[in-house]
Structure formats: structure tokens, C-alpha cells
Image (spheres, rainbow, N blue to C red):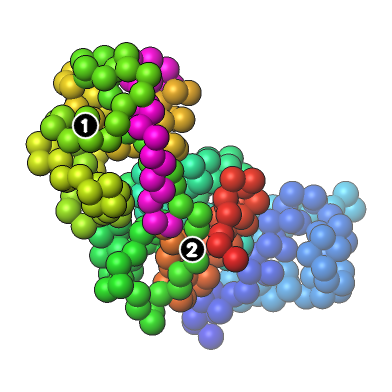
Amino acid sequence: MPIEAYLKNLRSVQLRLLVTIADTGKLGVAAKLCNMTTPGASRIVSELEKNLDIMLFDRSSLGMTPTKLGAGVIEDARQIIRDIDTFSKNVSDLKMGYTGKLKVAAVTGAALNFVLPAITQLKTERPLLEISIDVAASDKLMRGVLRGEYDFAFARLANIHFSEGLKFEKVLGERLNFVVGRKNEFFDSPDVNLNELQDQMWTMQGVGSPLRVTIEKLFQEKKLEIPQNLIQTDSVMAILHLLINTNVVAILTEEVINLLKDSGAFTNLKVLNTGVDPIVEPYYLVSQRNSMENPVTEPFLKILKSMQKFRFYS
């Protein structure tokens, strides 16, 4: 058999045996470490030397040491074994979810309340994971889910979003608050009626977004005109800028307010006491029906569901 063909058919156990003999200097010890008998190991080495036409080891009563040519062969064998071991570990880690990718999307409240804490814990346990998170309005997130861009998304749903290819689990809804900064005339007011805010400048999410729909329904129930003077944005950073620098009235979830308070950014802001307590419709944990094929999804969900403040509707 041509030497090239012979080498292409070598097994990793043969190469591992050569490396182990070189490391230990003892055929019997190397055989045991490679889970084979000493006669079997001796036969493998002899066949290799015969087919390669190279004396790989010098034998003596003290053991076996690589020849000059053998040392070169064994160094190549050592690199191949390293590559095989690395390949084996990478496959195992990927299968067990210790490496790989997880793509998550969420509305702001869910991102702050559940997703980011869960991801932080997951990265602590599995630092080699590649994790990405998109935070946006529900319509944008659902378009991404339907295109298969995310493993999970926390989004509020319209009827058009329900699809047989998706799984849905309802999560408890968020409480909304009316917030102003120091430049608003009602900042120092202990109580404010909703009708007093009608003519103020507002910032709201886009038309049709769940937060905006919730506020519009509230105004309609109170038989009030929906504010016309408004700036439309989904960005929390943009809303925060407006609150600090203008007299705008903003709608913020409790999760966002708690984050701002924890960071010290709420110092110059105030939640108005309007006597109403709107709760936005629940969002859903949405995933592709085959999402569990990604081994990272199970540990992520396990962390998520262990969080005290995370609750599905029964």
C-alpha cells in the first residue's frame, strides 16, 4: 500500500499511542493509558514502523525513547491529537449548550425585568456563549420572529401575529406611569387630574403599539380627547432626554422607572399621581416551534423560569 494511502487510514488511537509512549517512555504504561493490552500496543508500533519504513523508538531495558525521525513524526501526531481533542470538546460543548449562539428580542420592560438578568446569569455560567439581544417595539420584534431571526422574543401581539409556526406563552402585564421632569408645570403638584394633562406635550410609542393603545383607551374611557401635541418614539433614551430637557409628559413602565431609580437617573423626574393605574396588555414569550433544537435555549428558559418576578399566566 502506498504510504500516502496508509497514512490517510490511520486511526487516532494509533497516533495517541505514539504520543503516550513518548511521554511515558514505557510501552506497558502507555498501553494501559490507551485502554489496550501491551502486546496489542507493541503490534501497533511495529506495524507503523514497518509501513512507514522508519524506526520510531529506540528500545532499551530502561524503556522507549523516540528516534530523531520518530520525534518528528510524534510531534505531528501530537498536533493531530490536540486538534481531535479540541474538536471533540467543541462538539460536546456545543451539544450541551456551553458554546453556540442565542438571539433574544424583547420589549423594554421585559428586557429590563427578565431578559437581561437571565442573560447575565447565563453568561456567568457559560462565558463562551455568543448572546445578542434586540430591544424594540413589538411589531418590529414579531417581524423578526416570523423571519426566524430570534430564538425567543418577548412581545405584545396583535391578531395578525399568531401563527401555527410559533409557540406563545403569556407573561404578566406591566403597570404604566405618567412621568414628567422638573420643567413640567405639574412637577411639584401632589395630585393631577388626567384632563389637566390633555394639552401638554406628550411622548408616546408609535400608533398601534400596545402602550399607546392602552393610553388611548384610557382617555376614551374617561371621555377625554387624546393628546394631539406629541413626539413619537420607542427609544427610552430619547424619552429620558425629553423628560430632562423639556416639559413633556411620558409614559413609562414600572420596570423602566425602577431601573432609572436604581441608576440615579430619576432624581429630576417624578411619577404623577393621577388617580388612574393603567396596565398594558400582557406580552408573550414567543418562539419558533423548533427553538428547542438550539441547546442553549433550555438553560436560558430554566434560569428565566426560576426568577421570582417572572410569572406566566396559568
Q: Quadrant of the C terminus?
A: bottom right
Residue 110 vertical placement versus 245 (above, below): below
Q: Is residue 62 above or below residue 189?
A: below
Q: Which residue is found at the position 58% from the left and 71% from the top?
A: 52
Residue 165 sits above or below residue 310 on the image: below
- Residue under label 2, please give it: 170
Kindly state the secondary structure of the residue where label 1 is placed: helix
Q: How many angstroms separate mark 2 from mark 1 (CA)?
A: 33 Å
Would residue 171 appear left or right of 31 to someone viewing this image?
Answer: left
Write down the residue under mark 1. Answer: 197
Q: Position of residue 87 (x, y in %)?
A: 55, 61
| Residue 140 can be seen in this image | no
Query: Hey, what amino acid is under mark 2?
Result: Lys
Image coordinates for residue 249, horizontal then vertical, percent:
23, 30
Q: Nearer the viewer, residue 56 or 26?
A: 26
Relative to residue 117, is residue 26 drawn left or right?
right
Residue 255: give x, y in percent of width and height. Answer: 44, 37
Q: Main secondary structure of the magenta part?
A: loop
Q: Residue 313 sits in which quadrant?
A: bottom right
Q: Mark 1: which amino acid?
A: Leu
Labels in figure, total: 2
Q: Residues within 10 Å of mark 1 (few under 14, many from 20)?
A: some
The residue at the far left in this view is: 229
Residue at (24%, 24%) from the top-left corner? 243
- Please, what secondary structure does the residue beneath circle 2 have? strand
Magenta run includes residue 273: yes
Dot placed on the residue nearer the N-terminal end, 2 or 1: 2
What residue do we see at 38% from left, 15% from top?
A: 267
Along the line of sight, the residue nearer the viewer: 117 or 236: 236
Instruction: Give the extent of the magenta segment.
Output: 263-282
